[in-house]
Amino acid sequence: MTFYKWLINNYLENDDPFGDLAKDVKSDDGFPKEAKDWKTIEEYLESKRASFAAIDTAKEAYKKYQE
């Protein structure tokens, strides 16, 4: 399962930072939906000038995705 699918399936309805991230990536047509590796996701977020907090939240979500 991709990070995108995992995030949407598990957090889209949440009212917390992971939920916010899920909503943001769902509405972002350019998000690398097929990515399974952190480097691709991180590079995309940095290319979009995501805030440090957003990248940190994505990194924490990615750690949970790997579990």
Image (spheres, rainbow, N blue to C red):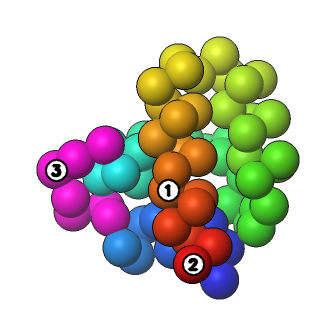
Q: Which residue is mark 1?
A: 61
The amino acid type, in three-letter code, at marker 3 is: Asp
Please provide percent x and percent y for residue 57: 46, 41
For the point 57% across and 33% down, the residue is 55
Residue at image mark 3: 15
**Looking at the picture, how far across and down is residue 29, in whole percent?**
61, 45
Q: Could you give the CA–CA distance between mark 2 and mark 3, rounded to whole angstroms?
A: 22 Å
- Left or right: residue 66 compared with residue 24: right
Bounds of the magenta segment = 11-17
- Is residue 25 visible to us here? no
| In-image side of 58 versus 15 (left or right) | right
As drawn, the label of residue 67 is 2
- The quarter of the rendered structure image containing the C terminus is bottom right
Q: Can you give x and y, in whole percent of width and height, for residue 2 in the image?
A: 66, 73
Q: CA distance from mark 1 to mark 3?
A: 14 Å
Three-letter amino acid code at disc 1? Ala
**Label 2 is placed on what type of residue?**
Glu
Q: Earlier in the sequence, mark 1 or mark 3?
A: 3
Asked whether 29 or 58 is in front, the reply is: 58
Q: For the residue labelled by badge 3, is the local secondary structure a helix, a strand or a loop?
A: loop
Q: Quadrant of residue 10?
A: bottom left
